Image: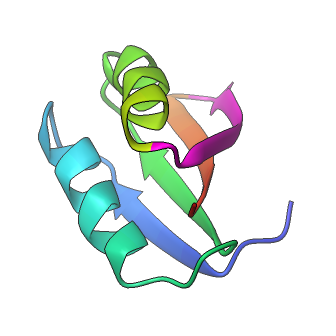
Amino acid sequence: MEFHKELDARGLNCPLPILKTKKALAEMKSGEVLRVVATDPGSVRDFQAFSRQTGNLLLDKFEEEKDFIFYMKRK
């Protein structure tokens, strides 16, 4: 999937991946896609809730080895 910006949140625990994602999305234009790589298993639940609460679209999420990959589209 194409993305405009990438955020490496590996090694960070809740709530840091979400806080860094929120900051990164704020710096992006509407419609742009952010790729986030995290290692915190709780981030799966957190990103789903973050998407519902903010209106930023969670385009895709999957696990690759020990990493959790998220694609967020800025509203």
Please state which of residues 61 and 28 is positioned toward the viewer in this rendering: 28
User: Could you say where residue 73 lies in the image, as x and y percent from the top left?
Assistant: 64, 58
Q: Whole-percent x and y of residue 49?
A: 39, 22
Outermost residue, right direction? 1
Whether residue 30 can be seen here: yes
Q: Quadrant of residue 59?
A: top right
Residue 30 point in image, percent of width and height: 60, 76
Which stretch appears magenta?
55-65
Q: Which color scheme does this rendered protein use?
A: rainbow
**Quarter of the figure with residue 69:** top right
**Residue ID at (42%, 66%):** 7
Residue 64 is a magenta residue: yes
Q: Quadrant of the C terminus?
A: bottom right
Q: Quadrant of the N terminus?
A: bottom right
Q: Is residue 56 above or below residue 74?
A: above
Magenta stretch containing residue 13, yes or no?
A: no
Q: Specify the principal SS of the magenta part.
A: strand
Please give the count of numbered marks on the rendered protein: 0
Task: Give percent across and percent down for residue 32.
Answer: 66, 75
Question: Image quadrant of residue 12?
Answer: top left
Question: In this orientation, does residue 11 appear?
Answer: no
Instruction: Identify the residue shown where x is 25% and y is 69%.
Output: 23
Q: Is residue 64 above or below residue 3?
A: above
Residue 49 or residue 7, whichever sits in front: 49
Q: Is residue 56 left or right of residue 4?
A: left
17 w.r.t. 36: above or below: above
Nearest the camera: 36 or 24? 24
53 versus 57 height, above or below: above
**Which residue is at 52% across, 72% downward?**
6
